[in-house]
Amino acid sequence: MTTATSTTSPLVLGAMMFGTTVDETTSFAILDRFVERGGVWIDTADCYSFWASETGQGGDSERLLGRWFAARPGVRDRVKIATKVGAEPLWAGSFPDRRAGLSRRAVDAAFAGSLERLGLESVDLLWLHMEDRATPIEETVEALAELTSAGTVRRVGASNHPAWRVERARSHARRLGATPIDVLQHNSTYLRPRPGTNPTNHPFGVLSDEQRDYAQAHGIEVWAYTPLLSGAYDNPAKPIPAIYDHPGTTARLRALDEIAAELGATRGQTVLAWHVARGVRPMLGGSKLDQLEAAMDAVRLPLSAEQLARLDAPM
Ligand SMILES: NC(=O)c1ccc[n+]([C@@H]2O[C@H](COP(=O)([O-])OP(=O)(O)OC[C@H]3O[C@@H](n4cnc5c(N)ncnc54)[C@H](OP(=O)(O)O)[C@@H]3O)[C@@H](O)[C@H]2O)c1
């Protein structure tokens, strides 16, 4: 992962709500400022954001990014774009039961749609958005192998997949001599959900110790989504969700407040810095320019090994 001392930022800009709840002017301003401050990775998906769109289908985020690329000649060379396939509802209201999935046909069709909406000839990273147990993972890997060998996809990643499925996909890619998955995307934040609960739509959505260990052992990058709990660390109007309500949270919030005060940072900024210090790339879904500025500052906060140990101490 890019380190906090380099000139590029390790922060990923999540474009999930761009073009739906975040209007075009604000989205463009956030994108422009992100690039200006050394941001590189922009994350979207073919299905963003079907739940907030007028049609009940995705595409608004990629279309907005396509308009931004068209309006900013040269910017494509300064950023890397990641999109996802597999989670688009087959029709409005059909998610999660009927979604595009990861068959060869579905991957090809979804990716062609993404390129068209983005107005690009290739992307830097293509994610498998969520599992499709109805399709053998080998079939999905073969579809991805065709895209990487054609040069329309540079890297492939898995989001919300258990480690054993990723390992199976990587060994099949190795057998084919294809580009293997080398990056995972999961829900991760400083607070831990109560055992047995799940803040995501995916059985393996929350970054587990096993997934992290697997990634570390194989030099696989990890990206963290919803690290700021949608703003709940700092926005009094957004209470911390009930599934984080347990005694461990009290101790963790105490440590977080202590380190945040030492850094002169907010809780959310400290959470982003904690991810970077652990080698995880945090993703920001900000809806306002000042949120972007705060996050870009946060990933450069000098969190010492001793402070990191104090943050990690409360179980
Ligand atoms: N792979 C997956 O399944 C998956 C799932 C979810 C997300 N993602 C990706 O991850 C990205 C980030 O996810 P997310 O939007 O859920 O995460 P997030 O960054 O935890 O939440 C974004 C929200 O946090 C609030 N916020 C940001 N900075 C703030 C600050 N300084 N103070 C107070 N509130 C602040 C804003 O809320 P307000 O708008 O209310 O101000 C913003 O809309 C997405 O854009 C998407 O690319 C992937």
Image (cartoon, rainbow, N blue to C red):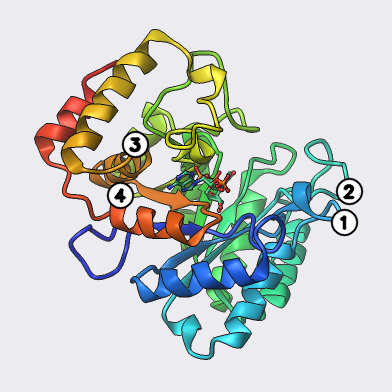
Q: CA distance from mark 4 to mark 2?
A: 39 Å
Residue at the location (64% across, 53% down)? 140
- Measured in 3D between alpha carbons, the distance from the residue under mark 4 to the one under mark 3, in whole angstroms, is 29 Å
Q: Secondary structure at mark 2?
A: loop
Which of the two discs, 1 and 4, labels the residue nearer the N terminus? 1
Marks 2 and 3, how far apart at CA: 37 Å
Q: Earlier in the sequence, mark 4 or mark 2?
A: 2
Q: Which marked residue is nearer to the observer: mark 4 or mark 2?
A: 2
Q: Is residue 173 visible?
A: yes
Left or right of 263: which side holds 166?
right
Q: Look at the image and tell me in which quarter the C terminus lies.
A: top left
Residue 274 in the image: above or below residue 176? above
Task: Return the mark for residue 267.
Answer: 3
Lateral position of residue 126 relative to residue 274, left or right = right
Disc number lying in front (2 or 3): 3
Which residue is disc 1 drawn over?
Answer: 55
Query: Secondary structure beneath disc 1?
Result: loop
Tag shown at residue 108: none
C-beta proximity under 8 Å, tags 2 and 1:
yes
- Disc 4 target residue: 219
- Dot in front, 2 or 1: 1
Crowd rating for badge 1 (residues with CA inside 10 Å; few <14, some 14–19, many 20+): few
Q: Residue 5 falls in which quadrant of the image?
A: bottom left
- Cβ of disc 2 within 8 Å of ligand 1? no
Please state which of residues 32 and 206 is positioned toward the viewer in this rendering: 32
In this view, the mark in front (1 or 3):
3
* Residue kind at label 3, given as amino acid type: Arg
Indicate whether 63 appears above or below 103.
below
